[in-house]
Image (cartoon, grey):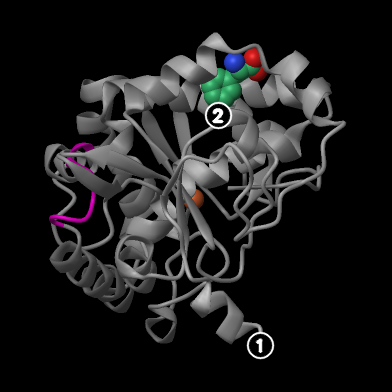
């Protein structure tokens, strides 16, 4: 993910913020954290994650024990779609993030959470970035979407509209659901890399599940500190790619600037509601 502060890369990083993965530096304990996370998620995700995501996991042989060695991973990923994973110390500035995506490079945090942080961590680590995001980068259509998103990001900077575009990322790449095999399936990296949310997003009665609509999504605020209150459902990756590349976002940004934001958890006129949530989880958390 990205952060807004612009600055120089930290000591030891290249001008594009990348660093060597230096895979041999990871300790046995760090590899064991990956293995525990992997094992937990791979028990949960068959039947829940989208066919494309599950296939990516196989194609890339991510089940091999330990934190993946990017040199090896990149051979398989490159052969599938031409994407590469590159290591960075942590969050990078927006423009750097977009520039990498536009060139089919996905940046991954070069650290792993501690064993006492299996369930939650705010900053994306190598488990979130690689297990969550990389399987779908082996899918040709999703691969093109991510590149187009990076190009769109560079344009959004010029239009002062990064926040709109960040919402699109959030509700697709991070927390998206897709119609798949007659039901809803997970594809968002924030969901598939989370033990709790992989169940909550599909099974809980609390959140709304709403048909994806580009304008609607760009108007919807999101929460970064807890499970989502709305999930947006795409019909297919082809449809997502087509809608986003066929729309010129510049007039859209101008049009949306005049409209109010939509709060998480709210249903508005025109929504294609697939399941209306009770919001019980969010209400309880808010202490109501
Ligand atoms: N079509 C978008 C634009 O005009 C670019 C884009 C494509 C953004 C795909 C996101 C995803 O800026
Ligand atoms: Fe992410």
Are discs 1 and 2 less than 8 Å apart at CB?
Answer: no
> Can residue 30 be seen here?
yes
Find out if the beta carbon at label 2 lies less than 8 Å from the nearest ligand 2 atom: no
Give the number of the disc on residue 51: none
The image's mark for residue 100 is 2
- Range covered by the magenta-colored residues: 46-52
Instruction: Indicate the position of residue 247 as horizontal and vertical percent values.
Output: 59, 13
Q: Can residue 104 be seen in this view?
A: no
Specify the quadrant of the image occupied by residue 202: bottom left
Give the residue at mark 1.
288
The location of residue 95, given as percent across then percent down, is 70, 32
Residue 77 counted in the magenta span: no
| Local secondary structure at mark 2 | helix
Give 267 or 178, whichever is nearer the viewer. 267
- Out of 198 and 209, give the one closest to the viewer: 209
Q: How many marks?
A: 2
**Within-10-Å neighbours for mark 2: few <14, some 14–19, many 20+:** many
Q: In the rendered view, would you say 113 is above or below 97? A: below
């Amino acid at each position: 993910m990205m952060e807004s502060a612009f600055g120089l890369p930290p000591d030891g990083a290249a001008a594009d913020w990348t660093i060597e993965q230096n895979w041999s530096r990871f300790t046995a304990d760090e590899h064991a954290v990956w293995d525990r996370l992997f094992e937990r998620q791979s028990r949960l995700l068959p039947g829940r994650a989208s066919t494309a995501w599950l296939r990516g996991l196989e194609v890339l042989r991510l089940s091999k024990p330990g934190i993946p060695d990017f040199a090896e991973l990149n051979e398989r990923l490159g052969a599938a779609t031409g994407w590469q994973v590159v290591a960075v110390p942590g969050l990078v500035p927006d423009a750097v993030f977009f520039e990498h995506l536009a060139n089919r490079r996905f940046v991954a945090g070069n650290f792993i959470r501690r064993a006492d942080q299996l369930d939650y961590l705010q900053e994306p680590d190598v488990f979130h970035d690689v297990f969550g995001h990389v399987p779908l980068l082996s899918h040709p259509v999703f691969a093109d979407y991510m590149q187009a998103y990076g190009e769109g990001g560079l344009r959004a900077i010029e239009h002062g509209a990064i926040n709109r575009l960040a919402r699109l990322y959030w509700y697709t790449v991070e927390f998206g659901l897709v119609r798949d095999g007659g039901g809803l399936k997970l594809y968002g990296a924030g969901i598939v890399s989370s033990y709790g949310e992989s169940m909550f997003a599909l099974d809980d009665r609390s959140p709304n599940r709403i048909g994806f609509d580009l304008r609607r999504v760009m108007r919807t605020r999101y929460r970064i500190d807890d499970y989502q209150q709305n999930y947006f459902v795409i019909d297919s990756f082809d449809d997502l790619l087509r809608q986003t590349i066929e729309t010129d976002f510049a007039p859209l940004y101008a049009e949306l600037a005049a409209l109010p934001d939509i709060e998480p958890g709210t249903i508005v006129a025109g929504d294609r509601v697939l399941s209306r949530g009770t919001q019980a989880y969010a209400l309880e958390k808010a202490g109501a």
